[in-house]
Amino acid sequence: FAMKDFAEASFDVAVDKGTWDAIPKTKSRNMLREVRRVLKPQGLYLVLTFSRPPNALDFLLDWRVGWKVEDFIAVPNPRSSLTSESMKNFYLYLCRNEDRPSDWVPQGKFSSPEVLPAIEQALEFQKLTRQLSGQHQELS
């Protein structure tokens, strides 16, 4: 997934309504890195998706992508009576193109009982993958 027609730091804001949902999750990290590449420092990435916070934050907080996720909002789906329970809400994520501090701890909505366990699990998994990645580089 590449946006080769755009130079680095070309945009102040990127709005994604459904593109991330359509990308296979195996390619998600590449897409998120590429969006970050074309955004200016401090630029905003607004993602409107059906991905609930435990799933979306697992990708958006990935250390290999590095977004600073500032907020998320549940937006009721006006057609929810015609869809499945999983599509009851859209979720809007506000991501800033800056590195998340290494000592970041979930606060506010991120520390709610339905989101915090997923974030903690994602951050722990990422800590392990970072360690393994470093060990792999040392062996190369």
Image (cartoon, rainbow, N blue to C red):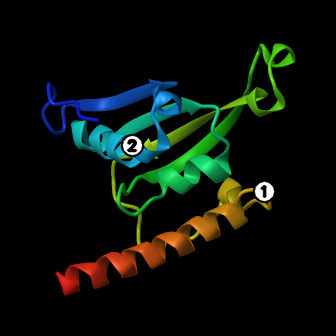
The residue type indicated by label 2 comes to Lys
Q: Is mark 1 on a helix, strand or loop?
A: loop
- Type of amino acid under label 1: Glu
Q: Whole-percent x and y of residue 132?
A: 37, 80
Q: State the count of labels.
A: 2
Image check: 74 left or right of 70?
right
Q: Residue furthest front?
A: 140
Q: In this view, does 18 lie above or below 58?
A: above
Disc 1 or 2, which lies upstream in sequence?
Answer: 2
Tell me, for residue 27, which label it has, or none.
Answer: 2
List the residue tagged with mark 1: 114
Rendering quarter of residue 83 = top right
- Name the quadrant of the C terminus: bottom left
**Viewer-nearest of labels 1 and 2?**
2
Q: Tag 2's secondary structure?
A: helix
Say which residue appears at 42% left-offset and 73% top-offset.
Answer: 129
Vertical position of residue 117 compared to residue 57: above or below: below
